Amino acid sequence: MELSDELKKLINEAKNICVIPSQNNEPESLSAALALFYTLKELGKNVNLIVEEFPEKLNFLVPPLDFISSPKNFVISIPRSLADISQIYYEKSEENLKIHLTVDRGQLKKDGVLFYFSDAKPDAIITLGIQDFHKQLSDKLDSFGFLLNSPIINIDNHQENLKFGNYNLLKGSSLSEIVIEVIKSIDEKLIKGNIANCLLVSLIIYCENFKSVKTNPEVFQLSGSLIRNGAHYQQIIENLYKATDKEINFLEKVFQNLKADTENNVSVATLEFDDFYNFAETEANFIIEKIKGLGIRNNMLVLWKSHASASTIKGFFYSKKTDLLHKIAESQPFGFAQGKKSLVKNDWLFISIPEQDIRSVKNSILKLLQ
């Protein structure tokens, strides 16, 4: 995938670049985004990495917070039609900052106060693993409106991508492979150290540590090249597949709450605990590995509530029956999953559905199994 001269010029001349991975907490896109972050920093760019949070298992890739640029010009706006403010002062302590407002006229209500960033429009935006850019930012445009109307470089490997970018780098391979081609088009010598490490992480996640049917000779060849350029395979495996206390607790709660649905031939667990609001595909993959290790062959559906700003139910469906996996994958709403059939992994699929009611999602999925 050779970059056009126009795209190379955009990247080379851009001084301020925003890198935005998928908000579905997909470790593949997050690690690929970090590879681009380090690459662009190496080129002397000011890079804003727009990420809510990183999974704990990727912390070994993440640079210190003072090295990561993020939007800093935060504005609190109060419409004059809502209230007139006559005095403003603040108190700053070690614990917090308090801003005091004296209302001269009108009534101040929380819902009427606007909060947003007023940073300068970036010279370029690079998205990774996002199928619909505006849908991903639909509940964030008040805060991130400065991103609009900047040229977008859209990097994705999902068939359902809306081609929203000014430049659409779409390919049915791993994000790591696409990003490698982008970096090579700029300067192949940049792929070393942290950059090579992040790219190998993304590749390992994509092909499930080389166990997936997506693993081919090219993947092994690419992995070997990244290791020769400084990627640390053993360190990556130790971090990606180590069990955290939260994951062990997660595993216990899954098995404690499993109930057999004999009508649909599936075991179901719905977890309505605050502990798992941050959990996503990484934690689902941990559970799947344990299920496989135990030799469980029965269908299994596990769902939990997400902490995302747009109410979302997340979970996974495990089955040895490929037709059931594809049936559920096809039913997922576009834009909140990884894309129909490409969702299906090795005997399981990750679920992410915009919904508040966990029981409603459970019943909808169970109907598909009838």
Image (tube, helix red, strand yellow):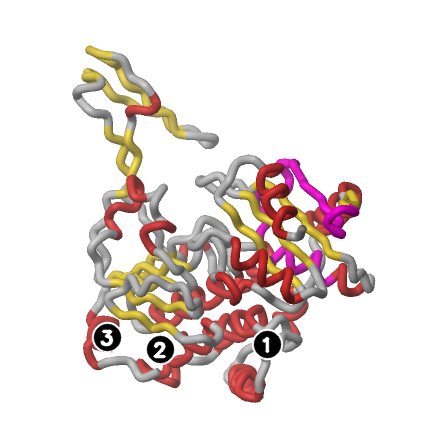
Task: Report which residue position mark 1 lands on.
Answer: 232
* Circles 2, 3 touching at the beta carbon (< 8 Å): no
Q: Is residue 263 magenta?
A: yes
Task: Report which residue position mark 2 lands on.
Answer: 182
Q: Crowding near pointer 2: few (<14 within 10 Å), some, many (20+)?
A: some
Q: Amino acid at mark 2?
A: Val
Q: Crowding near pointer 1: few (<14 within 10 Å), some, many (20+)?
A: some
Q: Is residue 167 magenta?
A: no
The number of discs equals 3
Nearest the camera: 325 or 151?
A: 325
Residue at image position (53%, 61%) is 27
In the image, the segment drawn in magenta is 262-289
Q: Amino acid at mark 1?
A: His
Residue at image position (45%, 49%) is 52
Q: Amino acid at mark 3?
A: Leu
Residue 105 appears in the picture as rendered? yes
Q: Earlier in the sequence, mark 2 or mark 3?
A: 3
Counting from the top left corner in percent of width and height, residue 60 is at: 56, 62
Look at the image and tell me in which quarter the N terminus lies: bottom left
Note whether 235 is above or below 62 in the view shown.
Answer: below
Q: Quadrant of residue 285?
A: bottom right
Q: Earlier in the sequence, mark 1 or mark 2?
A: 2
Residue at image position (23%, 25%) is 78
Helix or strand or loop: what does disc 3 sit on?
A: helix
Nearest the camera: 236 or 168?
A: 168
Task: Report which residue position mark 3 lands on.
Answer: 7
Helix or strand or loop: what does disc 2 sit on?
A: helix
* Circles 1, 2 touching at the beta carbon (< 8 Å): no
